[in-house]
Amino acid sequence: KDIEFSVGVLGAITPVARIEPVKLKGNTISNISLGSIDRFETLQLRQGDEVVIKYDVIPYLDKDEQYQPTSGKLFITPTQCPFCNEELIKQPVLRCVNNSCESRIIGKIMNFVTKMSIPNISIGIITTLYKENLLRSIEDLYQLENHGKVITRLNGFGDKSFKNIIEGINSRKEVFDYDLIG
């Protein structure tokens, strides 16, 4: 149906195929990561193409060799970041190198939260707090406690979720050298 390009934690662009939902092994598959820009370019996918979906642990998309290609629009590699519109660079991974890109800032914060094993904070929470201008850097994580009244009024947040976020941050305030290195 379509190809979307997601921007990863450190600016890497990953093509994701959106397909007509198909049920395999009890799971409904409607999108599949194509892994890399090189693989995406090799597939030469067009809108309306018939594809083969293989599924063991994660779904894998391949072109149906016996199917005649459609005359649908050819999906092409983007040249600009879908978030900040800056030019993308291929080195060898296609990536946004704009350090001010919204997706890269959110990604850096999420990377820190993951590496530090801070519980109760998801990419969704980080994205919402970023969009509300409450979380713009890793340092801002440690200032969220000062924004309780604002955060608890946000859609999807309340006193309990705010308390869980702050408890998660506070549980990882003391950091050992092996946490940082390991």
Image (cartoon, grey):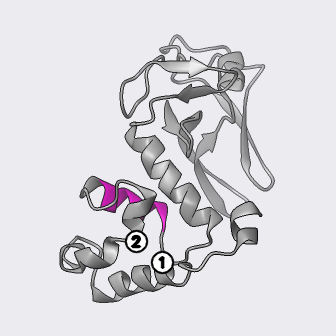
Q: Count the marks: how many?
A: 2
Residue at image position (51%, 38%) is 7
Q: Which residue is mark 1?
A: 169
The quarter of the picture where the C terminus appears is bottom right
Quarter of the image where one finds residue 151: bottom left
Q: Is residue 40 visible?
A: yes
Residue 17 in the image, given as x and y percentages of width and height: 57, 35
Residue 69 in the image, given as x and y percentages of width and height: 63, 14
Inspect the image, locate mark 2, and give the three-letter code of the amino acid beneath it: Tyr
Q: CA distance from mark 1 to mark 2?
A: 7 Å
Q: Is residue 2 left or right of residue 35?
A: left
142 and 8: which is toward the camera: 142
155 and 172: which is toward the camera: 172
Q: Is residue 22 left or right of residue 168?
A: right
Residue 87 in the image, given as x and y percentages of width and height: 45, 18
**Does 87 appear above or below 168?**
above
Residue 15 in the image, given as x and y percentages of width and height: 58, 32
124 in magenta = yes
| Direction top: furthest residue | 71
Inspect the image, locate mark 1, and give the three-letter code of the amino acid beneath it: Ile
Disc 1 residue crowd, few under 14, some 14–19, many 20+, Cα 10 Å: many
42 in magenta = no
| Direction front: furthest residue | 177
Disc 2 residue crowd, few under 14, some 14–19, many 20+, Cα 10 Å: some
Q: Is residue 6 left or right of residue 41?
A: left
**Magenta span: chief secondary structure:** helix
Q: Which residue is mark 2?
A: 142
Tell me the SS state at disc 2: loop
* First to last magenta residue range: 122-130
User: Which numbered tag is attached to residue 180?
Assistant: none
Residue at image position (43%, 27%) is 81
**Contact (CB < 8 A) between labels 1 and 2?**
yes
